[in-house]
Image (tube, rainbow, N blue to C red):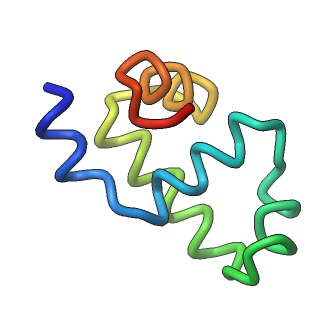
Amino acid sequence: MKDNLLQELNALELRCLALAARGRTRNDITLETDISHDRIDDAFVSAMRKLQAGNVAEAIFRAARMDLIS
C-alpha cells in the first residue's frame, strides 16, 4: 500500500501534510508557501481521500505511520 501511495500523493499534498504535522494552519501554509488557500484545501481533501482518512489529523497520522512525512 505504501508504494501505491508514494506514487499517488503528489508533492503539494505531501508538503501540506508535513507542514500541518508541524503545527501549521492552512493560513500559515498559505503565507509560508504563497500557495492559494483553495489549492491547499484541495490538497488536503485529495490527500485525505487517497489515505482514506476522515480528517486532516488522521491523514497526517497515516502518512507519518507510513513514513511518507516526518
Q: Is residue 32 above or below residue 57?
A: below
Residue 52 rendering spot, x and y as whole percentages: 33, 29
Viewport quadrant of the C terminus: top right
Side (left or right) of 42 relative to 18: left
Figure label count: 0
Residue 48 rendering spot, x and y as whole percentages: 43, 40
Residue 43 rendering spot, x and y as whole percentages: 49, 60
Is 52 or 33 nearer to us in this picture? 33
Residue at image coords 47%, 51%: 14
Viewport quadrant of the N terminus: top left
Residue at image coords 34%, 42%: 49
The furthest residue to the top: 65
Residue at image coords 63%, 75%: 38
Residue at image coords 44%, 29%: 63
Location of residue 5 by image quarter:
top left
Q: Is residue 46 above or below residue 36?
A: above
Q: Is residue 67 above or below residue 20?
A: above
Q: Is residue 14 above or below residue 49?
A: below
